[in-house]
Image (spheres, helix red, strand yellow):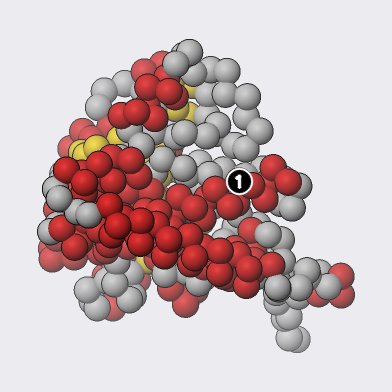
Amino acid sequence: MNAEDLLQAYEVIQRLRRFEEEVGDAVASGEIHGEMHLAIGQEAVSAVLGRHLRPGDAVVSTHRPHLHALAAGVDPVELAAELLERDGLNHGKGGHMHLFDPAVRFMCTGIVGAGAPIAVGYALMQSLRAQGSLTVAAVGDGAMNQGAVFEAMNLAAVRRLPVVFLCEDNGYSISVRREESTAGELSRRGAPFGIPSFACDGTDVVSAEDAVTGAFEITRGQSRPALVVASIYRFRGHYEGDLDLYRPAGEKEKAARARDPVLKLRQRLLDDGTQQARLDEAEARALEAVTRWFTGARRRPLPRKETATDHVFIGVEG
């Protein structure tokens, strides 16, 4: 990545961070109800992912899906409107854990590990059509202990399916530390299946770029699965409202100084000679874009009661 690539990535990361912050503010104000999982701290991985996805690729995400959706090309106004419980991407019926956009082949599920077999289904379709497309199966470190993920990896390897398993390892399965739940190194989980693996610092955009580039080259070029394990840090609780008492005292403060992808990339750019004014301009553009998205989303109407069963049932003739 050259200096201009890094500056562009910085603007993308700023948009992703501000998008999640806007959602968090809407939860705090009561505008959004129910459980909400934010990906603040995970922006670098999605910024890199968006650089590599092509039309025809698919992404199957998790209960923390907003940044993956934006990387996949989901319309940000439609996405924001859905999260704000308005007539958005899925007409107010999907909420934040059940987002679907067939136009860009994006979906997510709130069931831990359940997206991996679905992603393999997408990859099987892509393999049969031989169009050079691939699927990204996003999982967390907790999902890497699920049998469904192992079965999906096995089938993908046996059938040589074009799927990249992307594990975003934030070190916690809700409130359980990875060291207390997981044996061995996650980056070695692909080895028994012959799946090449790439480990990276997911808070560093250059490290993430190297890993994702390597995985995508193998999967797209050889039509076979690959695994990326990105070490990241989740700066919010598992969900908004989580008291977050399971983390050691001072852990977040330490991570804020060393593992915030926004601050890390900003400092890298400054160290490489990028002028402060250019960073300020990128930040201003990011803020303007996210403000415009949410302004447009809030103009969308709330779903009408009489549409409650629309797009829920399909008619069967005869």
Instruction: Say which quadrant the N terminus sits in.
Output: bottom left
Residue 38 locus on image (x, y percent): 53, 44
Classify 227 as above or below 147: below
Q: Is residue 39 above or below residue 281?
A: above
* Any part of residue 233 in sight: yes
Image quarter where the C terminus lies is bottom right
Residue displayed at 50% across by 47% down: 64
Left or right: 213, with 11 as reference point:
left
Q: Residue furthest bottom?
A: 318
Q: Nearer the viewer, residue 156 or 9?
A: 9
Left or right, 47 with respect to 304, comes to left
Q: Residues within 10 Å of mark 1 (few under 14, many from 20)?
A: some
Quarter of the image holding residue 194? top left
Give the x, y percent position of residue 70.
44, 62
List the residue tagged with mark 1.
24
Residue 277, above or below 33: below
Instruction: State the residue lying farthest toward the right.
Output: 306
